[in-house]
Image (cartoon, rainbow, N blue to C red):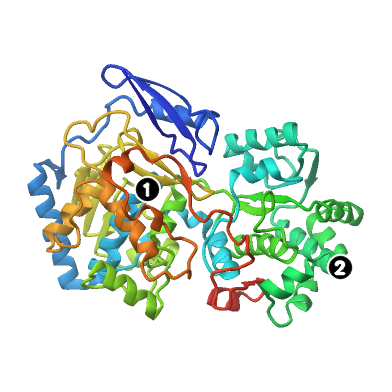
Amino acid sequence: MAVVRSLCGQCGVGCGIRAVTGKGREASIEGDPVHPANGGLLCTRSEALKDMFALEGRLLRPVVDGRAVGWDRAIDQAARRLSAVIARHGPGSVAMHVPGGLLTEDYYVANKLMKGFIGSAHVEAPCSEAGGMAAAQRAAFGEDVMPAAYEDLAQADMLLLVGMPTARRHPVLHERMAEARAEQGARLILIAHAGDGPEVEADERLTVAPGSEAALLSGLLLHCHDNGLLDREFLERRLSVPAGFWAGLSRGHDLWSVARACGLAPGEVRAFYEQVAAAPRLVTLFSPHGQGEEAHRLSAAILNFHLATGRIGKAGAAPFAVTDAANGMGVREVGCRAGELAAHRDFSEDALAQVGRFWGATRLADRPGLAGEALARAIEAGRIKALLMPGGLPSASHPIRGLLEQVPLVLLMTPWSEPEMDALRMVALPSPLWIEKDGTLTGADRLISRQRWLFPLPGETKPDWWILTRIAQAMGWRDAFHYERPAEIYREHVRLTAYRNEGRRLLNLKRHAPISNPAYDELTPWRWGEVPFDEGLFPTADGKARLIAFWDQAAFRAR
């Protein structure tokens, strides 16, 4: 019998678990009472961990073109075929799909291989659901930084919950909000749609028309502007306001226009505005889904309000976007997405030089790649000749899933024996389920925690980072991919966040640069960034945050 402190990993919250393992693949699981994310709470999503105990349906040996082979032959075939595709069609013919459920070390190696050595940035990542929010945070703060922490809920005067799904998909977050109401007297206001269930008990519920939330919250900012309720000192010293911002905001966001858009009476809207404006410590919780205009508008409206009223950079006052993807923060930290390079760097000239030098890159991708519908269209057009898929196949509803037959080479790392393995020209390599993984995860509030395996790897299964490392070595990049354990990858990731940083980015994990292997094994949860922006300084050229004129989509996307 052994006691293992690990993570649930079934959503973006990052809850800790305490598992007592027995003989074979048996374990009892409960919430870890000392983990900061959940304090012992667990929701029904954790039941999925028990479904991973059995080995039925697992892929336990490498498979090449439908035939089981040894690891040496499988890695050789993967490297040879991938090298041939690159030589014949160029780096842009290679794409990668990474799902949720990988650890930060897996994402780091995958991103380094794709962008630094294969030379492609075509990456479909799990946090595309948060694209609007991530883009808004970069535009507003200069960096994709989540300003809030779970502890802020207990220090807020008011919790503004935008959308019932935010609580429905994250029951532990719901419990923490209930605790804040019961123990701290925080007032909870819910913005919901007609037909949403009664799952969340709120002090007040505002039922609005679907898609009108951004208009409602933009009108809140206009209300504060017109009634002298902005933080003028913060606005003048710490914010950059685009020319014509207030005139642009006034169009369509007056009280009557907002009321019509939301399907509310003007008096209801005014009462809501007055309540929220009177709460000095406000946490706004929302789930930003999708890459479309509405996701951009909602995220921008919330960030604009918190910035212009000074409700940021202090305990109990912050916007808080919670995503579904497990370790969605980790994938963003290492830059394993189509629009980023690494460690919160973009594809600017300086960033390319820094990352290329640090990695010793032989073929560095120098521009953003394709993702989402654009990547699906490229596959349909026959421009993608090889697809790397660490972590398994996408869901049946994902647009890429139905296009695999059109990709000449699929390198799949998966825990499962899939029907496609016999039908496609595929190299399928056995990778672990969550309860067999070892590494780190970053929760939605920047809390880095250790994932520890409950059971040893079954059969010939190998970690995703190990598989990608061996493929890279077989392709001739052994000096850059020398990893034998996840602690080595973590140290390199940490050093890259600090390399030539000089305070330009809040993501700086330098305190762990010298971490030893035993210290990594015993790592306790820690949050990078402390209280972001508490001194009113932002990682922009002038140190100021920016209000986002989201109605000017061209200007917004150019940031």
Q: Position of residue 15 (x, y in %)?
A: 49, 36
Residue 27 showing in the rendered view:
yes
Which label was assigned to residue 394?
Answer: 1
Q: Is residue 199 visible?
A: no
Q: Amino acid at mark 2?
A: Gly
| For the residues bearing labels 2 and 1, Cβ distance under 8 angstroms | no
Question: In what element is the residue under mark 1?
Answer: loop
- Across and down, in percent, residue 34 comes to 50, 31
Q: Is residue 47 above or below residue 337?
A: above
User: In the figure, is residue 524 to the left or right of 1?
Assistant: right
The residue beneath circle 2 is: 228
- CA distance separating discs 2 and 1: 50 Å
Residue at point 59% right, 74% down? 543
Residue lying furthest right: 267
Task: From the top left corner, tell me how far across and down residue 277 is, in percent.
Answer: 82, 56
Location of residue 492 by image quarter? bottom left
Please state if 72 lies on the left or on the right of 310 as rendered.
Answer: left
Q: Quadrant of the C terminus?
A: bottom right
Residue 108 point in image, percent of width and height: 32, 56
Amino acid at pointer 1: Pro
State which tag comes first along the sequence, 2 or 1: 2
Q: Residue at x 35, y 29 (%)?
A: 52
Depicted 454 relative to depicted 158: above or below: above
